[in-house]
Amino acid sequence: MITRITGILVSASPLAAVIEVGGFAYEVHVPVTTAERLPQPGQQARLHTYVVYREDAQTLYGFAAEDERDFFRLLIEKVSGVGPKTALSVLSKLSLAVLKSAIVSGDVGLLAKCPGIGKKTAERLVIELRDKFTAENISHPMTSAATVSGDSPVSNNKIRDAVMALVALGYKAPDADKAVRQALVFLGAKATTESLIKKALEN
């Protein structure tokens, strides 16, 4: 099993990255939330990976943070009806902090807004995964831009708190999540909750 890949980023798109390692170029499927944090082509990138084997293909999926990779694995292994494509779209729509919070709180409506996830599948997400997450591991530090740029990690609770603050100000949850992710990319992993909110409001 290939669990991590480190090399030079050759090219990137919102859902894929090509990384050269030892003369070989590997195509890695990534969620938008990881693509946002990739460095410029020509720089070193590191992704936590998961390989899906099929009779006719071997597909490599990559994530900026190890816990994002583990969440992807949980989705496709534990939730009936969720395959790699759907799992990738879920992680493209919302950050991991918001996804975990929605599962723990049973926010089926928010989960159902993810592409490929209807109400029934969202309910299965809550039923199958709720016991996997607690308030403690939701706030556990996650590697953000750190995985691809070498900065210090930012904690999930900072991201979640910033998103919830924007929601309280009238933002829709997916829009708030996207604004905070963009603010994090701009400010870096040392950003505070307050600075994330301020920068998100400027966009």
Image (tube, rainbow, N blue to C red):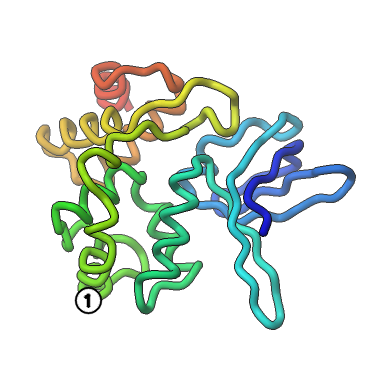
Q: Nearer the viewer, residue 177 or 189?
A: 189
Residue 90 quadrant:
bottom left
Residue at left 21%, top 52%? 102
Residue 74 quadrant:
bottom left
Q: Position of residue 47 (x, y in %)?
A: 61, 43
Residue 59 quadrant:
bottom right
Quarter of the image with the C terminus is top left
In this rendering, the count of numbered labels is 1
Mark 1: secondary structure: helix
**Callout 1 crowding tier (Cα within 10 Å): few <14, some 14–19, many ≥20:** few
Q: Position of residue 46 (x, y in %)?
A: 64, 37
Depicted 122 relative to depicted 120: above or below: above
The type of residue carrying mark 1 is Lys
Q: Position of residue 175 (x, y in %)?
A: 27, 43
Q: Residue furthest bottom?
A: 55
Residue under pointer 1: 120
Quarter of the image with the N terminus is bottom right
Residue at left 29%, top 50%? 99
Residue at left 23%, top 29%? 162
Q: In the image, is 103 to the left or to the right of 12?
A: left
Q: Position of residue 54 (x, y in %)?
A: 64, 78
Q: Nearer the viewer, residue 131 or 178?
A: 131
Residue at left 18%, top 40%? 171
Q: In the image, is 198 to the left or to the right of 66?
A: left
Q: Nearer the viewer, residue 13 or 153?
A: 153
